[in-house]
Each structure stands twice: as structure tokens, then as C-alpha cells.
Image: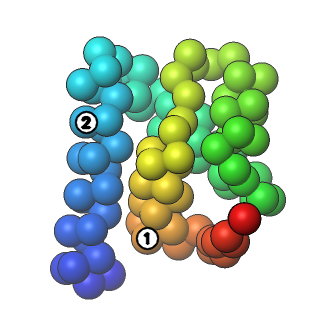
Amino acid sequence: MSNKNQKDICVDCISFVIFYAVRGFSSDEIYLLIDELMIILKEGGNFTQSSVNLKLEKRQKTELRVEEKTLALAINIFKNKFNYSVKEYLIN
């Protein structure tokens, strides 16, 4: 993995954590959200902000929900760090 790629991942991770931390969520709550997102995204399929939030709600492990920006950050982290395969589509 290139140095630039590692720096991009670090920036994405920090941005993700800061997004929730400034809203008053604890590090434990943020970690749980990341863990839940990994489980959901690892299953594969098509994802939108709404579908991911619905799955988070059904799993009942965390009250946190993703926003479009944080979902994009999470997907980018998983894609670059864990080699998740991601195809993005533009929906009009």
C-alpha cells in the first residue's frame, strides 16, 4: 500500500470519528458503528444511505445512523484498507 493511500485512509478515519465525536458520541459508540458497518457491508449487495440505516436499525446494536458523507467515508476506508470491491452508481 502506498504512503499516499495510507494517508488518505488516515484522513478518512479521522474525518469519520470527528464527524460523530463533535456530535457528542463516545469513542465506544463510534467503534460500535464502525464494527456494525463492516458486518453489513461485508455481506455484499447494493447499498444506499437508507438501506444501510435500515439494516443498522434492524440489528439494534447502535443508535447511530450514517449520513451520506459518513457512509462514503466508511466505504472508502473499507475499500482501501481491506480491499473491499466497490462499484458506485449515480442515481438520478
Label 2 sits on what residue type?
A: Ile
Give SS at disc 2: helix
In the rendered image, the quadrant that contains the N terminus is bottom left
Residue drawn at x 19%, y 79% is 3
- Please give the residue where the numbered disc 1 appears in the rendered image: 80
- Please give the residue where the numbered disc 2 appears in the rendered image: 18
In the rendered image, the quadrant that contains the C terminus is bottom right
Residue drawn at x 27%, y 26% is 21
Q: Is residue 48 above or below residue 3?
A: above
Q: Is residue 90 left or right of residue 34?
A: right
Q: Is residue 26 above or below residue 75?
A: above
Q: Earlier in the sequence, mark 1 or mark 2?
A: 2
- The count of marks equals 2
Are there few (<14), some (14-19), or many (20+) residues within 10 Å of tag 1? some
Are there few (<14), some (14-19), or many (20+) residues within 10 Å of tag 2? some
Give SS at disc 1: helix
Q: Residue 55 in the image: x percent, y percent?
A: 74, 33
Q: Which one is nearer the viewer's eye here, 39 or 58? A: 58
Residue drawn at x 23%, y 58% is 11
Q: Is residue 26 above or below residue 67?
A: above
